[in-house]
Amino acid sequence: MTNKEERKRILTGIRPTGALHLGHYAGALENWLRLQDEYECFFLIADYQVSDKADDIDSVREAVHEIALDWLAVGLDPERSHFAIESLIPEHAELTLWLSWWLPLGMLQRNPTLKAEMAALESKSVPVAFFTYPVMQVANILMPKAHLVPVGEDQLPHIEMTREVARRFNRMFGEVFPEPEGLVGRVPRLVGTDGNAKMGKSLDNAIQLKDDAETVTKKVKSMYTDPTRLRATDPGHVEGNPVFMYHDAFNPNAEEVQDLKDRYVVGKVGDVEVKEKLATVLNNLLDPIRERRAHFESKPKLVRDALAAGTGHAKKVAEETMREVRAALKLNYLD
Ligand code: TRP
């Protein structure tokens, strides 16, 4: 393995809105796990990004701990990677502000992800912090000078913005920041159990990493399948069928999946069997995660220590970067 100092860096983040689900796993966590050896990783709990939870900070606090627990449960290793809480590193807020000096409003207005999210808020009033969250995200990524940002597909416009901001900054003030690349997971967007385009806790269509086996089996049994198929003997559709999408995403036995598909399209297998097999696959995947989660749940001090150590390290790195940024911007008025 390469020396720690030589490793390139990853920064990626998540909003503390609740425990993690299978969509996070296939879309992101799986990549993070794999990349821990190769990169020095900063995993950020982005609590500056939850203006939608402003009146429910207790839920944010709970989510911070739930997420750390989920990270430990899937096998992210706080010895190698840094679990950091964003607002305990206020340098993120400071860098956001300096960067916003050179970030044209139009760049935010054109950002397709932000545009879609604003549209989804419809008539609700939009806090300024919501409109500027992509700038904060740019600051998050630039802070440890990350080279790689493994994220969900919807986050790519923010990475493009980061590259643009880094280029501008370097051009004006000298080479400070690398231009980071985005990396989308194996399953960029997992459909919900209800067939909704996206799995989300608030949509009530998620299988959580902490769900017990019985809950997972129940959720799989009630999953949407092919609405045109009334009897097991009817020929069914595999495409666009959430149950098969999950088999494709999670079943390591490609032969079994192919056999189920072959029989499904000719009406030789019932939804029950396809779902039973899926429940088994998911529970096999989740069993070791549940075991580790139970271990850390019984030792909350380990979770807290992981967050404290990671945040402490990330804060030091942030202070270093900010010293450089301040010097580049000639802000040291009293020196
Ligand atoms: N906005 C991201 C999301 O909702 C979370 C996030 C915050 C993030 N800061 C980041 C992702 C920095 C990548 C890099 O998923």
Image: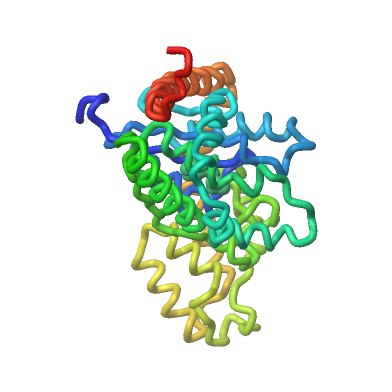
Q: Nearer the viewer, residue 102 or 39?
A: 102
Please identify the residue farthest to the top as the structure is shown: 335
Picture residue at 59% right of the left edge, 66% below the top: 197
Viewer can see residue 147: no
Q: Is residue 62 above or below residue 135?
A: above
Query: Is 148 on the left-hand or right-hand side of 191?
Result: left
Residue at point 61% right, 31% down?
Answer: 64
Camera-side residue of 304 and 208: 304
In the image, residue 51 lies at what x, y percent?
A: 70, 41
How many numbered badges does the structure rendering display? Answer: 0
- Where residue 26 appears, as percent x and y from the top left, is 46, 52
Q: Nearer the viewer, residue 28 or 293?
A: 28
Q: In this rendering, would 5 be left or right of 334?
A: left
Q: Quadrant of the C terminus?
A: top left
Q: Is residue 324 left or right of residue 269?
A: left
Looking at the rendered image, the quarter that the N terminus falls into is top left
Is residue 216 placed above or below 259 in the rendered structure?
above
Please name the residue shown 36% across and 26% down the image: 80
